[in-house]
Amino acid sequence: MSKSLPGRSMLPISKAQGDRKALLEEAARRAGRYLDELEGRSVFPTPEALAGLESFDEPFPAGPQDALETLSLLDNVGSPATTTSAGGCFFGFVIGGSLPAALAASVLATAWDQNAGMVVSSPAAAKLEDIALGWLSEVWALPVGVGGGFVSGATMANFSGLAAARHALLRQESWDVEAQGLFGAPPITVMVGEEVHVSLLKALSLLGLGRERVVRVPVDQQGRMVAQALSHLSGPTIVCIQAGNVNSGAFDPTAEICRIAHAARAWVHVDGAFGLWAVAAPARVHLTVGVSEADSWATDAHKWLNVPYDSGLVFCRHTGELRAALTHSRAAYLAEGDQREPMEYTPEMSRRARGVEAWAALRSLGKSGLAEMVDSCCRHATSFAEGLAAAGFEILNEVQLNQVLVSFGDPQKTQRVIKAVQQDGTCWCGGTVWQGQTAMRISVSSWATTKTDVERSLEAILRIAAHA
Ligand SMILES: Cc1ncc(COP(=O)(O)O)c(C=O)c1O
């Protein structure tokens, strides 16, 4: 229940906000300590830490409160109730850590407090975004002149790429979808694999394309779309493929799908939320053959580039189509220059300067660092799979990337192991059902994961599984 605040709430604002520099130094000190202490902590918060969150239940203060004391409350109560996803032992969902360079750049960019939507509101943010987009299109070997934008994550990146597809296909049918909407528009066929990610379906629903009117294409045992099933394409069509299945990590046969789809003048959109980063690693690039042939691509920087949340990226081969789909109507107060205006390539107008962190991550890693970061996560995943298989547990996927699916026996036992692993606190793994089989998912997506983290985590999982 709410506790009442002490009766000292009428400080002037400037007094309550305090010494800005001292406050930021204190925040940096506390942030550094938080990160230093991650290793010894339970990966999921303890019951005591969760119960402590009640301390936030206070009435909205009647007046200004001391900023230093606010920071201290945030750290003392909030920090222990976080998952240690910034550390090396969080293997749930697909969650990257934060490279120190990206984190530090984010802190500085937050102090800049830039609106990255327009060049005029932040020349520095716009420039760094341009550089990061350029470097990334080089990493993915995308065609020269490809258009792109920074969005909140792969969900919005899928939305943006599919908006460009919807625009282009309907323009070819002489229909202006941005002006007229979809009422009375020529139909678009949307094809997805049976293993499509839910966020792509959500993007389709937001675009009025419908999450249920899609044509579902059969997949193989790894969740890869069967390309031959695409043979009868006709009319305006979007083929949505995956580079990296969220469970198995598998890639759709991109080269073949692009060939079939493009012969029928269909648009190919790639959901590569994490898998697209495999292009950066020479040892994994074979998985992505043909990916640069697609028309639009969605990925996350907060996953495998390891920048702080939130950060996603859309790219589109046809820059004009992306811009036409996402730009706003003219407004007298908005400047129009001859430079690329970031907000014309994303659904949002005002937004934070996500390009700064991506630039810092890329610059601090370089090509070889990026390759090594991606590849080391994949090697760790292989070590997990080998250790679990050696102990007699069934690995359900071909571990070619950073994802491992393991069954510990019947569904009940696997569920017991997952729950016990989560309670144990050495590491954190989630559950899933993969093609009818209950499984534990291990996703290695952080630069911070070390060989020791993998060994410790494996030891804990095997200890738990032996008694579950
Ligand atoms: C293949 C795929 N697509 C899309 C998403 C959604 O990404 P976000 O949560 O960044 O929107 C995910 C998330 O894991 C994913 O794995």
Image (cartoon, rainbow, N blue to C red):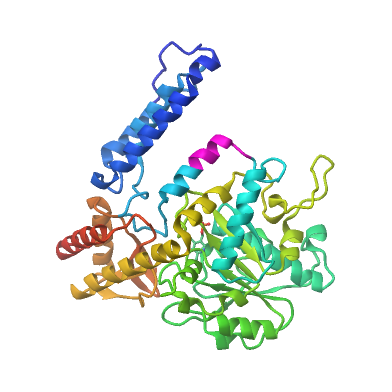
Residue 169 image-quadrant placement: bottom right
The quadrant of the rendering that contains the N terminus is top left
Q: State left or right for residue 160 relative to residue 111.
A: right
**Residue 130, percent from left and from top:** 64, 55
Q: Residue at x 16, y 61 (%)?
A: 463
Q: Is residue 280 shown in magenta?
A: no
Q: Position of residue 138 (x, y in %)?
A: 58, 67
The reply, left or right, for residue 230 in relation to residue 410 is right
- Residue 309 showing in the rendered view: yes
Q: Left or right? Give the position of 29 relative to 360.
A: left
Number of labelled discs?
Answer: 0
Is residue 202 shown to the viewer in this render? no
The structure residue drawn at horizontal position 47% and vertical position 48%, both measured from the top left corner, is: 102
Q: Position of residue 287 (x, y in %)?
A: 46, 77
Q: What stretch is highlighted in magenta?
A: 106-114
Residue located at (47% from left, 75% from top): 285
Task: Tell whether 387 sits left or right of 94.
Answer: left
Q: In this view, does 225 lie above or below 160?
A: below
Main secondary structure of the magenta stretch: helix
Q: Quadrant of the image for the C terminus? A: bottom left
Q: Does the magenta stretch include residue 108?
A: yes
In this rendering, is residue 417 above or below 282? above
Q: Where is residue 280 drawn, in percent x and y? A: 48, 68
Q: Give whichever of 419, 337 is nearer the camera.
A: 337
Residue placed most toward the observer, 42 or 198: 42
Q: Is residue 325 above or below residue 30?
A: below
Identify the residue shown where x is 30% and y is 42%.
Answer: 36
Name the image quarter holding residue 159: bottom right
